[in-house]
Image (tube, rainbow, N blue to C red):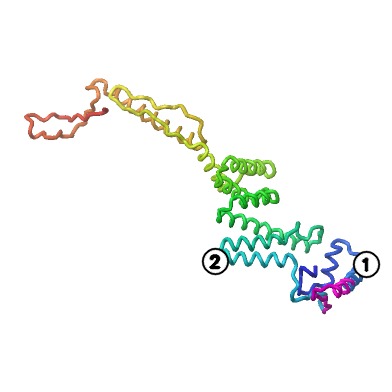
Amino acid sequence: MLAINHNRSVSLDRLVDAVWESAPPATAREQVQNCVSLMRRNLRTTPADLIIERNRIGYQLRGDDFETDAHCFEREVRAADELLTEGRLADAAGRLQQGLAHWSGPALDGLNARELRAHAIRLDELRLAAMERLATTNLRLGRHDRAIAELRALIEIEPLRENISILLMDALADSGRSIESLTVYRVYRDRLRTELGVEPGPVAKARERQLLQSLNPPAPIAVENRVGPTRLAAPATQHRHLDRAEVNLDRKISSHLETAYAHIRAAFELLGAGPPGYIELPGLTPPHAEQRKTTPPTYHRRVGP
């Protein structure tokens, strides 16, 4: 508690709660004071310039050059963020790696007091964000192998974090490993369905569609659509095995063609008494009519080939 709140005062009650959160003993305050006295004696034998002071609020751990692993980690992450803003990707990746090197396990592992766990959750979230940022930076630098290794480790920690799965899919696809990329999506989708009963978000689904299209590009669909005075070829209705969106599009095209075929065939049946292949359009004057001796009352326009 004193190290987390370095150079800040911590009340005696907060120290008691950190040790005995639910049911402190009657001697809790005295025990904390005894522990602080023991810590003071131990600090005198270390080279660190650290002291524990008592004030009107409680206790304070003071030391100008004192840094925990958490302090060093956060300092490196801040420096990396500045480098990323300046576009210095390689330098930023180096600082992120240095920051993450300070981690040796979960933050404050084994300490379950409420205030300590809140601090640990904050640090763990910062660690995940730094790991994700490092993987993204390595992708931008073309270091796909490093990014894939980092993202696979991240998924083990946070299997339901969608952005990590999407980044890993992109890294694998860019490395020519599209089948593995598709497997990452399907493992993530199945985990969501099993554990939460929900589907992946639209971005992840769009990535899956892109992968399917790259693995199985659609072939051109040939449709016979000749129109003649006495015969109209019916449109093809057989569909090859395609992605669902492509099959729906093929069905819509076939439906429209079948409707058009039925209308044109009905029109030709109505014209059965007239000259085959012609429709009379009353009121239209044929070209060069003034050069003819007689002008027919109707004009015939050719229909069909």
Q: Quadrant of residue 62?
A: bottom right
The answer to which of 242 and 247 lies nearer the viewer is 242
Q: Is residue 42 left or right of residue 282?
A: right
Q: Position of residue 32 (x, y in %)?
A: 88, 70
Magenta span has 41? yes
Q: Identify the residue position indicated by label 2 in the image.
A: 86
Q: Which labelled disc corresponds to residue 26?
A: 1
In what quadrant of the picture does the N terminus appear? Answer: bottom right
Q: Are marks 2 and 1 in contact (CB under 8 Å)?
A: no
Drawn side of residue 297 relative to residue 247, left or right: left
Tell me the distance, in whole angstroms, between the alpha carbons under discs 2 and 1.
57 Å
**In the foreground, 193 or 272:** 193
Whether 74 is drawn above or below 257: the answer is below
Q: Is residue 14 magenta?
A: no
Coordinates of residue 193 in the picture (x, y in percent) = 66, 41
Q: Earlier in the sequence, mark 2 or mark 1?
A: 1
How dense is the environment of label 1, judged by Cα within 10 Å: few (below 14), some, or many (20 and up)?
Answer: few
115 shown above or below 40: above
Q: Which residues are magenta?
A: 38-55
| Residue 16: image location, x then y, percent | 85, 67
**x, y (%) of residue 161?**
65, 51
Q: Residue furthest bottom?
A: 56
Q: Nearer the viewer, mark 2 or mark 1?
A: 2
* Type of amino acid at the residue the image marks with label 1: Ala
Q: Report helix, strand or loop for mark 2.
A: loop
- Give the residue at x 68% y 45%: 196
